[in-house]
Image (cartoon, rainbow, N blue to C red):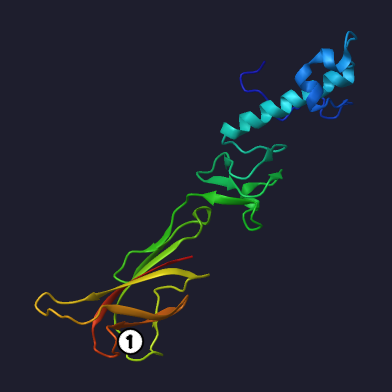
Amino acid sequence: MPSNPDFHKIFAADGDRTEISDADYKGGWNDIVGENPPSYKQFNFMGNRTDIRLNYLNHLSSLEWQYQIKYYPGQLVRIPGSDKIYVCKIENENKTPTSHTSDGMWAVFGGSPMMSLQEDGYIKLPEAMGHLLVQWKKCVESTAYTDKIAWPIPFPNAVFNVQATRVQPADQPTNEAGSIVWNVDPSGFVVTAGWQFGNGKQVYVLGIGY
């Protein structure tokens, strides 16, 4: 046997095979053929089934992508010569990860997040991690209910959660109500420091979505 076995070759892949039922499989040759010798088609079926199972187990732990191998959702592969790892999203065979991310069969696993580490900034996780987008912004409260403040970048799909914290100088204690966020959508929000508009208060806003 070579030091690097070729898992592309499946025994009797193109040969005649007689399928053996699960019930007979558990009982062995005696339940299948009794005292008679098995036929070559039955031997072909057993060899083929064993090779397919070994092939599957090997590629659960192998990262090297290969042709003629069926991949299942969640399996990780690497293209030789590439520093990227891909995760299978849809069961497929002979679909190169580098050519089939746009159709959703594969996605880059991990990868570098998009980010802007500024006072008003964001971090967007890669596709394999759900495209989660976290944004933060320091702003002056809105002057009216229609005075919407834009996120650093729009959320492509939806906003899940928003938190607002008033910026209050240490030498200016207050008993006013906390910040309130209104009219939130993927493009922006309205925020007040308390129940009144236009007090000129600064507010930190944190948004989570995708």
Residue at image point 32% right, 79% down? 180
Q: Residue furthest top?
A: 35
The mark tally for this picture is 1
Residue at image point 29% right, 84% down? 141
The answer to whether residue 176 is seen in the rendering is yes
Residue at image point 50% right, 44% down? 83
Residue 68, position in %: x, y?
73, 37
- Closer-to-camera residue (134/85): 134
Per the image, the residue denoted by label 1 is 142
Question: Looking at the image, is 8 positioned above or below residue 36?
Answer: below
Query: Is 25 on the left-hand or right-hand side of 184?
Result: right
Q: Quadrant of residue 52?
A: top right
- Closer-to-camera residue (110/206): 206
Residue at image point 45% right, 58% down? 125
Residue 46, position in %: x, y?
79, 21
Query: Is 58 on the left-hand or right-hand side of 30?
Result: left
Three-letter code, disc 1:
Ser
The answer to whether residue 11 is seen in the rendering is no
Question: Looking at the image, is 114 positioned above or below residue 81?
Answer: below
